[in-house]
């Protein structure tokens, strides 16, 4: 066993003073106690105040209670629809669509309101997986900043009058329909019909994060301007050159699912895929890689070229950095060894680089195996040059009318000013966007589009694979689907619904088949299509190689613009759940910032992380130093975070922040916009900037980081037992490593077998019937955060805002801990989802003075809010730090409205009140209590789902099914959302259940977090096994 | 009626007191707990009486089990349109067997009346015309033995003389309603006076004895200044005062006996009592949802399209005012947007805004289907004798103690429901005889997160 020490923070690495102090206390802020030399009256809450409050609250409670009970009405339907039973949820298959992304989902509709989305198991693409953004999309439906009616020049008008006004202004020049990538066959039909009606019109697709480089390279190499399907599940060796395919590249849900198949270990025959990653700034995919190598943004082309020459047996040339050079050599060796079962992907938007990558894939025979041309991926189709030409045309006055749907170039285009200037020269500008975003604000006509949960439609995310969209709620506002507007303006009388229906009835043959397809939500090819390859055309390769080697060398410091998994190109910025989801890599919420490496921190910020005092100074205070970043005379000031795994001469900034006020209070004023730093080079937009000027300022800026919020160390439990990790080589040598280690730890208490009864003075209890348990595979968990948002949605977890997160008051019931180990400059990373462990011998239960938290016969650690008096002893005694306290009235659930504005609590951020709006509250799950101030809450194992599942089985008079033969009466929210099926949940008393199977099949890797303190958790983990190069070499050598 | 219902509840609670008092010991020694409880139960005269009564009932009425099934089937299938002794949407069913020449014909009529009418059988055609060509529902999948059960039930019920509910039942409610509180109070007072006298006697005797032995007597302290008495009186006052304060405070959030005036005088007594309509016909949600659901206007109109006047016995509000039933049906028509004699356009209906009676706090999760469909609990268990209520009132106090109490006592459908097959240990214990039944509490029914989450 490599006894590698894991660390979450720099303080922990150095065992600094601040870390030791922080790990002693549960609550990391000073309590309002008085110091010895102050009088009681000087205290924040002196005794007299206490007595005043006590007297007041007693009197108030007496008055409130003695009031008459208000008369409540019970109003039934006038005519009850046949398929609705109030109190019973209906599920409708539909499709999540956002700027080209299309994911088949199932929407849970309770009493007419969609309250949760889940993945659609019938989709062969996502297989029921979701992402954080898909999970959060239901909240967008109830966004208070949605546009509620059509406007002309900002004034409310009726649909009829806007139709008339638009129709009369058409025909004075060519119409351009500007959209994000559209992969809906019927929408394309609508556009084509419009273009037919107005000859000279055209359709331009624009993607905020462009894949033009990849599309054009494929056209050059394979004669097809398209993106093939990737098969990561068929790849034994995966090499990624700055492609964040588990986080933000194309369709991370599908890729995560495929990736996880290669990472799942069969205990009897251990083997794993190998993933080598080259990147500039730490990303989610890079953190999951078996081996990560760092390069500068300007070197990406050189790395690809060197890899090509190494794969062809000509050795690595042109790479100076020794580590990087050996990385390329190793990658080439692995790729060649696994020829036909290996894959190279690249995130660059440079055509030449992508042509070189195509050449590598041709050399290692990926075509038809890991790259499949039988079906193309249709998520992105925008070509930057087309859009650049449109902007020129607009400025030249050559565009008569511009219709904009789903695109926001006034924010995302590198030269937004030019676009806005062009927009002003277009006579008729129409926006279908659903909020008053940067582009819509400059448009004359606004006809807001429906949310996808209010819409009809379809999508073809992968050619041949269709996903249908049906409304789950009547449109909340006076909005209309943009397709209907276009149809109307084309003079066609049928509605878009008629068109969708007749299109599919014609294609499927009859109406019954259409009904069935609508119910399933997906239409798949009858038989699975064989993977095919296209011949590689090497004609452009030499030119590409020449262009790459001639590329400009980077300056002293380079900048890489990246997307955060939750925010993307700004689509998630208006969603409070996504803003508050800690970024998996930086663990920061509510901001973007400048990412620098520890090495650069030393020179730029004068912070030496290996120095305990200095690392504490950096880490303890949420106020971070601010640096002014200048590119091409444009300057932005941003706080700095030090993130290991970043190339020393490279800095990174996330796009998607700095939105205008029109996007709503959630996004307004959060972070800075850096799209302006991007540039157009060689016809494609580049997010890599070769030269950036950094200047340290005297300012500081608070960043709400959650990383150090849950630290715990005692003599009995320290971090190594929280997490277990080993290399594949070690695992192969001795599969029982983890088990032996556990045996060693538990030896004084009777060993693994007898630990439960002998390790404690408490009695042993029987467990008849059901006993709930969970198993989390750290090998397949990528840390993507879908579970965090799914849990928020399912359990009504409050949003607390940046100021409260900065005060350690974050509320998420499940957090994903990030652990580093090894080299500070390029460490290994492990993600561990941590929720309430539902200990069978729970330390929290013993200390509650009012028995508000206690144990159920089914193994649940129950939390009863109405009994809790808020002593927080339980949170203090919890070794996993998973209990959350309602420090303020985040939900507006208290009887006394003033509780949200108390001085002692602090002023809450606007977003808290946005979430308390009657509209936003429609997303609440009616089966889960909304917690009020002063109570503790925590993961309940989705007890409402457990009760529902049990009831289902009882009604059918049969035992509960939790995964035996893949039949499920229930799945908990995190399990259901997980794109890699890393989380398995069920009845551990049922020997056939999936969770028992997971534990038995992986008994050598199974471990419990901080097991030796005898908490007897019901959550087990499977140790992370890493197929790392160094260790494997060492083991062989 | 209301008062008697309340009293019954009190009595149940009273019987429970020993169990509740003992329950803290449950954790310390389950054996002691069980044996004590059993002892009390065995010794309880109530228990014996119940047993004897049950036995008598069984002997007397066992031959009626036929029509008991029939009752359920009747309410399920027929009661929405038929009564036994009077005409509703369909004819009164008493003596129906005599009206048909043979049973086979009757079977086919019940299963598919349209087919019989088409065949031209004269009695059927006459009947159809007589009832304004109202089509009877088809019961093609109703087995013959169920029809027999229904017919058996109709026979038994039809032969009973019609009961006038206004006439008081002989043997009287009055005797049952005797209140013993006053008696207990007087007894306590007498005992307290006796104790007081005895204490005084004791004090005097002690004084005499002291005198005899030459111990100097202390100055006698008058009763009102005696510290022991003062303390005693304070304690008693504190206990009684505290009891009433606490009970009063607890009662603040509760609304037992709440009986608001509803927008329509809807009588459950007429519908569920006199006309025997199954509860689930209108409150179908009770077996599939957490809510029992108040029926929508179109459900009311299913029957009231045909039933447009009330001809039953006089109806009275709780205040004693007479209600015109036909006018109440007219109120429904107004909500439904229905004009008699014209076809009804359901889209014109407006919902009736009923006043909600049973309200649980927001932090309580209650699921009707769990109790009705799985637990097979009768509606009356929680809602009282709804079939006798003209205006519904809240029968139970819906307190947590009341819920928990029921969960402690109620047996789950352990052998019948396949879900419980996983409780192997309990099944074994029941086979061995170490356990005679499994209550809701045994399978975790009193744990917090069964209702609070």
Image (cartoon, rainbow, N blue to C red):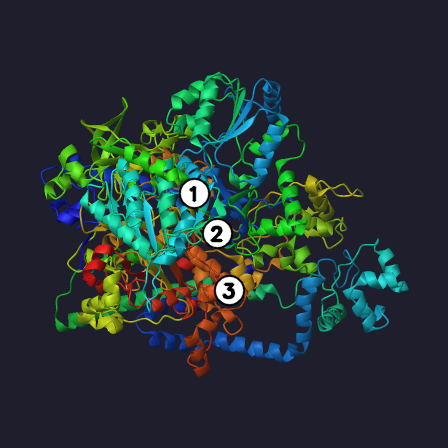
Q: Relative to A82, does residue A607 appear above or below in the rendering?
A: above
Residue A953's tag is 3
Residue neighbourhood size for the residue with mark 1, other residues' Cα within 10 Å, grouped as few (<14), some (14–19), many (≥20):
some
Quadrant of residue A916 within the rendered picture: top left
Estimate the spatial distance between the alpha carbons at disc 1 and disc 3, rounded to whole Å: 59 Å
* Quarter of the picture holding the N terminus of chain A: bottom left
Count of numbered labels shown in the rendering: 3
Which is more N-terminal, label 1 or label 2? 2
Tag 3 and tag 2, C-beta contact below 8 Å: no
Q: Quadrant of residue A166?
A: top right
Judging by the rendered image, the residue that carries numbered circle 1 is A537
Distance from the alpha carbon under mark 2 to that under mark 1: 16 Å
Residue A476 is situated, as x and y percent measured from the top left of the image, at 54, 36
Q: Which residue is mark 2?
A: A532
Q: Are marks 2 and 1 on the same chain?
A: yes
Q: Nearer the viewer, mark 3 or mark 2?
A: 2
């Amino acid at each position: 066993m490599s006894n590698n020490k894991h660390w979450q923070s720099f303080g922990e690495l150095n065992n600094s003073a601040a870390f030791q102090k922080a790990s002693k206390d549960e609550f990391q802020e000073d309590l309002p106690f008085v110091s010895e030399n102050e009088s009681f009256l000087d205290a924040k809450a002196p005794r007299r105040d206490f007595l005043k409050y006590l007297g007041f609250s007693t009197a108030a409670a007496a008055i409130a209670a003695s009031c008459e009970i208000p008369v409540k009405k019970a109003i039934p339907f006038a005519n009850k629809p046949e398929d609705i039973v109030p109190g019973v949820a209906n599920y409708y298959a539909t499709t999540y669509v956002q700027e080209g992304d299309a994911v088949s989902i199932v929407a849970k509709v309770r009493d007419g309101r969609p309250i949760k989305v889940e993945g659609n198991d019938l989709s062969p693409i996502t297989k029921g997986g979701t992402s954080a953004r898909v999970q959060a999309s239901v909240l967008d439906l109830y966004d208070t900043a949605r546009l509620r009616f059509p406007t002309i020049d900002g004034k409310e008008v009726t649909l009829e009058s806007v139709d008339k006004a638009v129709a009369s202004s058409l025909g004075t020049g060519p119409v351009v329909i500007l959209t994000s990538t559209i992969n809906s066959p019927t929408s394309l039909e609508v556009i084509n019909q419009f273009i037919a009606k107005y000859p000279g019109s055209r359709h331009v697709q624009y993607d905020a994060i462009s894949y033009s480089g990849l599309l054009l390279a494929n056209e050059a190499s394979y004669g097809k301007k398209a993106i093939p399907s990737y098969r990561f599940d068929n790849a034994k060796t995966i090499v990624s050159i700055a492609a964040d395919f588990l986080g933000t590249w194309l369709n991370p849900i599908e890729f995560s699912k495929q990736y996880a198949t290669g990472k799942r270990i069969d205990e009897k025959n251990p083997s794993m895929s190998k993933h080598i990653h080259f990147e500039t700034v730490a990303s989610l995919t890079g953190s999951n890689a078996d081996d990560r190598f760092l390069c500068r943004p300007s070197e990406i082309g050189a790395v690809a070229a060197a890899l090509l020459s190494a794969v062809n047996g000509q050795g690595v040339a042109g790479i100076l950095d020794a580590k990087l050079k050996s990385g390329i050599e190793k990658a080439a060796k692995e790729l060649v060894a696994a020829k036909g079962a290996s894959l190279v992907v690249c995130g660059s938007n440079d055509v030449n680089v992508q042509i070189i990558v195509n050449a590598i894939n041709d050399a290692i025979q990926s075509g038809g195996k890991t790259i499949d041309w039988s079906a193309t991926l249709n998520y992105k189709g925008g070509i930057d040059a087309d859009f650049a030409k449109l902007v020129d045309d607009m400025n030249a006055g050559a565009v008569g009318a511009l219709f904009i749907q789903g695109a926001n170039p006034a924010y995302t285009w590198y030269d937004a000013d030019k676009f806005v200037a062009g927009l002003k020269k277009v006579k008729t500008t129409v926006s279908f966007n659903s909020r008053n975003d940067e582009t819509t604000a400059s448009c004359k006509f606004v006809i807001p589009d429906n949310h996808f949960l209010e819409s009809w439609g379809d999508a073809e995310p992968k050619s041949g694979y269709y996903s249908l969209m049906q409304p789950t709620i009547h449109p909340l506002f006076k909005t209309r689907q943009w397709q209907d507007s276009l149809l109307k303006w084309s003079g066609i009388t049928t509605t878009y619904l008629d068109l969708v229906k007749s299109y599919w009835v014609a294609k499927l043959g009859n109406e019954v088949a259409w009904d069935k397809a609508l119910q399933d939500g997906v239409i798949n090819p009858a038989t699975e299509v064989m993977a095919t390859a296209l011949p590689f055309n090497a004609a452009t390769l030499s030119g590409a190689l020449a262009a790459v080697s001639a590329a400009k060398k980077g300056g002293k410091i380079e900048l890489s613009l990246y997307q955060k998994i939750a925010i993307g190109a700004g689509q998630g910025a208006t969603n409070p759940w996504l803003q508050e989801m800690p970024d998996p890599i930086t663990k920061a919420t509510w901001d973007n910032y400048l990412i620098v490496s520890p090495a650069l921190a030393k020179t730029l910020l004068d912070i030496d992380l290996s120095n305990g005092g200095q690392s504490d100074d950096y880490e303890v205070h949420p106020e971070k130093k601010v640096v002014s970043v200048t590119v091409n005379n444009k300057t932005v000031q941003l706080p700095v975070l030090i993130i290991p795994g970043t190339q020393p001469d490279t800095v990174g900034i996330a796009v998607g922040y700095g939105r205008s006020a029109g996007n709503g209070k959630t996004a307004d004023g959060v972070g800075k916009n850096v799209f302006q730093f991007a540039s157009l080079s060689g016809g494609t937009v580049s997010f890599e900037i070769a030269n950036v000027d950094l200047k340290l300022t005297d300012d500081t800026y608070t960043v709400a980081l959650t990383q150090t919020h849950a630290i715990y160390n005692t003599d009995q439990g320290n971090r190594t037992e929280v997490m277990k990790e080993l290399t594949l080589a070690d695992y192969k040598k001795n599969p029982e490593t983890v088990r032996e280690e556990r045996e060693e730890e538990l030896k004084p208490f009777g060993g693994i077998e007898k630990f439960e009864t002998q390790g404690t003075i408490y009695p042993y209890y029987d467990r008849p019937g059901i006993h709930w348990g969970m198993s989390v595979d750290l090998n397949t968990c990528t840390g993507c955060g879908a579970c965090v948002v799914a849990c928020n949605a399912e359990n009504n977890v409050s949003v607390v805002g940046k100021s409260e997160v900065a005060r350690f008051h974050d509320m998420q019931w499940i957090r994903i801990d990030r652990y580093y180990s090894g080299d500070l400059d390029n460490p290994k990373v492990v993600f561990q989802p941590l929720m309430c462990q539902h200990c069978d011998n729970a330390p929290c239960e013993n200390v509650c003075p009012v028995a508000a938290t206690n144990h159920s016969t089914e193994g649940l650690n129950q939390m009863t809010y109405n009994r809790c008096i808020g002593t927080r002893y339980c949170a203090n005694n919890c070794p996993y730090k998973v209990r959350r306290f309602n420090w303020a009235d985040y939900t507006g659930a208290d009887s006394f409205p003033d509780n949200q504005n108390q001085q002692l609590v602090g002023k809450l951020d606007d977003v808290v009140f946005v979430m308390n709006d009657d509209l936003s509250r429609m997303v609440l799950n009616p089966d889960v209590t909304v917690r009020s101030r002063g109570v503790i809450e925590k993961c309940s194992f989705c007890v409402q789902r457990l009760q529902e599942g049990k009831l289902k089985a009882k009604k059918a008079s049969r035992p509960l099914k939790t995964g035996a033969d893949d039949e499920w009466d229930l799945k908990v929210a995190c399990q259901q959302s997980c794109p890699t099926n890393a989380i398995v949940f069920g009845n551990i008393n049922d020997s056939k259940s999936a969770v028992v199977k997971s534990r038995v099949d992986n008994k050598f890797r199974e471990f419990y977090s901080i097991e030796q303190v005898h908490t007897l958790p019901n959550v087990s983990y499977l140790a992370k096994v890493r197929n790392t190069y160094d260790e494997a070499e060492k083991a062989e050598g | 009626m209301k008062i008697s219902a309340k009293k019954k509840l009190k009595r149940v609670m009273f019987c429970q007191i020993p169990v509740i008092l003992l329950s803290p010991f449950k954790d310390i020694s389950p054996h002691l707990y069980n044996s004590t409880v059993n002892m009390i139960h065995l010794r309880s005269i109530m228990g014996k009486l119940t047993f004897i009564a049950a036995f008598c009932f069984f002997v007397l009425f066992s031959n009626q089990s036929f029509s008991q099934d029939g009752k359920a089937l009747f309410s399920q299938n027929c009661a929405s349109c038929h009564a036994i002794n009077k005409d509703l949407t369909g004819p009164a069913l008493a003596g129906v067997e005599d009206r048909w020449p043979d049973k086979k014909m009757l079977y086919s009529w019940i299963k598919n009346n349209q087919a019989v009418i088409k065949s031209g059988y004269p009695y059927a055609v006459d009947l159809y015309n007589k009832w304004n060509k109202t089509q009877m529902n088809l019961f093609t999948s109703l087995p013959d033995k169920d029809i027999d059960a229904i017919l058996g039930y109709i026979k038994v019920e039809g032969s009973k003389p019609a009961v006038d509910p206004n006439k008081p039942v002989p043997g009287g409610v009055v005797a049952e309603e005797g209140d013993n509180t006053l008696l207990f109070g007087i007894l306590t007072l007498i005992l307290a006076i006796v104790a007081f006298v005895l204490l005084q006697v004791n004090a005097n005797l002690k004084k005499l004895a002291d005198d005899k032995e030459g111990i100097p007597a202390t100055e006698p302290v008058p009763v009102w200044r005696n510290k022991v008495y003062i303390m005693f009186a304070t304690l008693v006052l504190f206990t009684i005062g505290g009891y009433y304060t606490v009970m009063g405070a607890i009662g603040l959030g509760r609304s037992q006996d709440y009986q608001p005036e509803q927008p329509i005088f809807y009588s459950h007594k007429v519908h569920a009592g006199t006309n025997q309509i199954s509860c689930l016909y209108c409150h179908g949600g009770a077996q599939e949802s957490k809510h029992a659901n108040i029926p929508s206007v179109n459900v009311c109109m299913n029957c009231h399209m045909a039933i447009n006047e009330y001809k039953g016995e006089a109806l009275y509000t709780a205040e004693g005012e007479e209600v015109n039933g036909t006018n109440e049906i007219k109120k429904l028509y107004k909500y439904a947007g229905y004009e008699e004699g014209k076809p009804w356009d359901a889209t014109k209906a407006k919902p009736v805004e009923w006043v909600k009676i049973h309200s649980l706090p927001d932090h309580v999760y209650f699921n009707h289907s769990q109790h009705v469909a799985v637990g097979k609990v009768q509606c009356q268990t929680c809602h009282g004798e709804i079939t006798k209520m003209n205006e519904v009132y809240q029968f139970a106090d819906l307190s947590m103690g009341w819920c928990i109490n029921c969960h402690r006592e109620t047996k789950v459908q352990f052998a019948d429901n396949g879900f419980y097959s996983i409780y192997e240990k309990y099944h074994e214990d029941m086979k061995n005889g170490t356990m005679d039944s499994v209550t809701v509490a045994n399978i975790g029914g009193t744990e917090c997160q069964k209702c609070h989450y």
